[in-house]
Image (tube, rainbow, N blue to C red):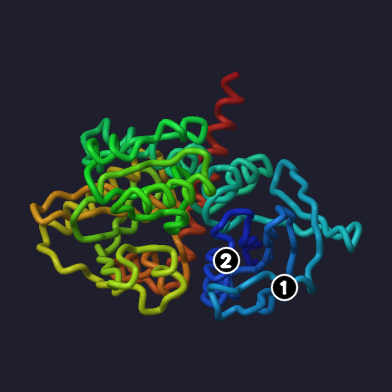
C-alpha cells in the first residue's frame, strides 16, 4: 500500500513558535512511518518556509521548551505550487525537484497559524488539512467573538469588557473595578497558550497587565475572575459525528496562581493534571455535551480543546476554545482523548488525518456537484 504524503508544518511567526516546535517533535516521534511519507516543513520567525529532510534532527535544544529553536542549517528554502490534484513544493536549492503533498498537519499555534491564515493558504493550495477550517479557526481564535456566539445560545461566559489599542486611554481602573470587581484577568483577544494573560488585583498590576496584553494584540479583553476549578475537554470529529474526550482538571501550583504559559510549558511542576477530573458522572456528561455544542456553534471540525470553569455552585462557565491545541507530552488534548477512547497517540494522529481527508472529499464533491448544476 502506498504511503500517504503527509506534510507536517510547525513553527510560525507567533509568540507560540516554541510550543509548536515541541508539539511537532512529539507528533514525529509517534507517527507510523509504515503509513506516512513525512515532509517536515517549518515556518521561521521571519515567516520564511523551510524544508528539513532530516526530520529527526531539525531542532536545537529540543528538550528545552524555553530555548528550543529551529536549526539554522540542514534545510532547503522552498516555494509552493498549486494544481488541480494536490499542492506541491519546489526546493529552491534543487531547481526542478517537486515534492507532492496529499494532506497537511499544521501543528502551529497562535497568530498566522491557528487563526485561519494558514488554513486559508492551504485552501488556496488545494490541500486537505487537519483541524477546523478558515471560518472556524478565525472566530475561535478571537475570544470576544467566541463569547458573543456562545452567549447567544445560552452558554454561560464570564463578564467582560473589550478595548482596542486606539481606545487604551479610555481604560479606567476604577470603572473596571466597579463593573467587574477584583481581581480581573487581562487577555489579548487573539492569542493562545496563556501568552500575554495576567491577573491583576490592584491598579499597578492592572496597568502593567494592560500594557503587556497590548504588546501581543491590538484588542484585549478584561474579564471578571471566576472562582472555580479549571476543567478541560477534548472534542474529535466532523460535523454530525462528534466524540468528546475525558474531562480533566488543571490545578496550578501556588507559585503560578493560574495556568500561565510557564505553568503549561516551562515548569514541569507548574500544575497538577487530574485525568479524570473528580466529579459526578452527570456533571462529566454535562461538560462533554457542552464541549460538543460549543464545537458545533463555532463551526469546528477535526479537533479542539474546550476550557471551562466549574464553580462551587456547580455552574459550568465557558472560558475559551483551542482549535490547534498543544501536542506536547504534557498537553491535555491528546491525554483527554486517549483516556476516554482508549486510542493510542499514533491512532489519534491517524484519526485526525482521516477526518481531514474525509472533509476534503466531502467539500470537493459539493463543489463538483455545484459546477454540474451550473
Q: How many labels does the image show?
A: 2
Q: Can residue 108 be seen in this view?
A: yes
Left or right of 349? Residue 158 is left
Residue at mark 2 = 18
Identify the residue at horizontal 25%, vertical 41% (top origin): 177
Q: Provide the secondary structure element on which disc 1 rests.
A: loop
Q: In the picture shown, does residue 275 fall above or below 95?
A: below
Instruction: Locate the C terminus and report the quarter of the image it occupies.
Output: top right
x%, y% of residue 185?
33, 50
Left or right of 193? Residue 306 is left
Identify the residue at horizontal 29%, vertical 61% (top origin): 245
Residue at mark 1 = 71
Lower position in the chain sequence, tag 2 or tag 1: 2
Q: In which quarter of the image is residue 136?
A: top left
Left or right of 171? Residue 46 is right
x%, y% of residue 112?
60, 48
Q: How crowded is mark 2: few (under 14 residues within 10 Å), some or many (20 or more)?
A: many
Amino acid at each position: 500500500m502506498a504511503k500517504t504524503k503527509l506534510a507536517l508544518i510547525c513553527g510560525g511567526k507567533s509568540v507560540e513558535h516554541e510550543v509548536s516546535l515541541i508539539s511537532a517533535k512529539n507528533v514525529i516521534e509517534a507517527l507510523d512511518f509504515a503509513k506516512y511519507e513525512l515532509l517536515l516543513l517549518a515556518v521561521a520567525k521571519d515567516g520564511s518556509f523551510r524544508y528539513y529532510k532530516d526530520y529527526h534532527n531539525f531542532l536545537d535544544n529540543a528538550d528545552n521548551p524555553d530555548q528550543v529553536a529551529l536549526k539554522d542549517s540542514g534545510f532547503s528554502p522552498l516555494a509552493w505550487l498549486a494544481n488541480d490534484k494536490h499542492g506541491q513544493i519546489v526546493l529552491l536549492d534543487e531547481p526542478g525537484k517537486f515534492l507532492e503533498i496529499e494532506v497537511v498537519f499544521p501543528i502551529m499555534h497562535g497568530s498566522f497559524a491557528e487563526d485561519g491564515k494558514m488554513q486559508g493558504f492551504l485552501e488556496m493550495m488545494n490541500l486537505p488539512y487537519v483541524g477546523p477550517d478558515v471560518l472556524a479557526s478565525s472566530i475561535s481564535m478571537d475570544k470576544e467573538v467566541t463569547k458573543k456566539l456562545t452567549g447567544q445560545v445560552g452558554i454561560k461566559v464570564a463578564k467582560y469588557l473589550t478595548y482596542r489599542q486606539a481606545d487604551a486611554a479610555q481604560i479606567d481602573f476604577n470603572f473596571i473595578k466597579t463593573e467587574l470587581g477584583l481581581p480581573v484577568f487581562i487577555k489579548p483577544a487573539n492569542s493562545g497558550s496563556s501568552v500575554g494573560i495576567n491577573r491583576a488585583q490592584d491598579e499597578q498590576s492592572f496597568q502593567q497587565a494592560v500594557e503587556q496584553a497590548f504588546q501581543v494584540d491590538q484588542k484585549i479583553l478584561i474579564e471578571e475572575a471566576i472562582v472555580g476549578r479549571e476543567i478541560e475537554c477534548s472534542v474529535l470529529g466532523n460535523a454530525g459525528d462528534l466524540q468528546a474526550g475525558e474531562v480533566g482538571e488543571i490545578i496550578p501550583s501556588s507559585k503560578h496562581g493560574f495556568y500561565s504559559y510557564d505553568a503549561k510549558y516551562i515548569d514541569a511542576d507548574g500544575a497538577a493534571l487530574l485525568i479524570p477530573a473528580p466529579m459526578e458522572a452527570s456533571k462529566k456528561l454535562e461538560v462533554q455535551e457542552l464541549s460538543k455544542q460549543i464545537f458545533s456553534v463555532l463551526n469546528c471540525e477535526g479537533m479542539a480543546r474546550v476550557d471551562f470553569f466549574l464553580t462551587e455552585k456547580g455552574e459550568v462557565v465557558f472560558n475559551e476554545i483551542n482549535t490547534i491545541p498543544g501536542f506536547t507530552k504534557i498537553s491535555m488534548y491528546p491525554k483527554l482523548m486517549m483516556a476516554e477512547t482508549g486510542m493510542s497517540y499514533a491512532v489519534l494522529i491517524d484519526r485526525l488525518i482521516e477526518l481531514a481527508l474525509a472533509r476534503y472529499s466531502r467539500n470537493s464533491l459539493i463543489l463538483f456537484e455545484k459546477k454540474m448544476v451550473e
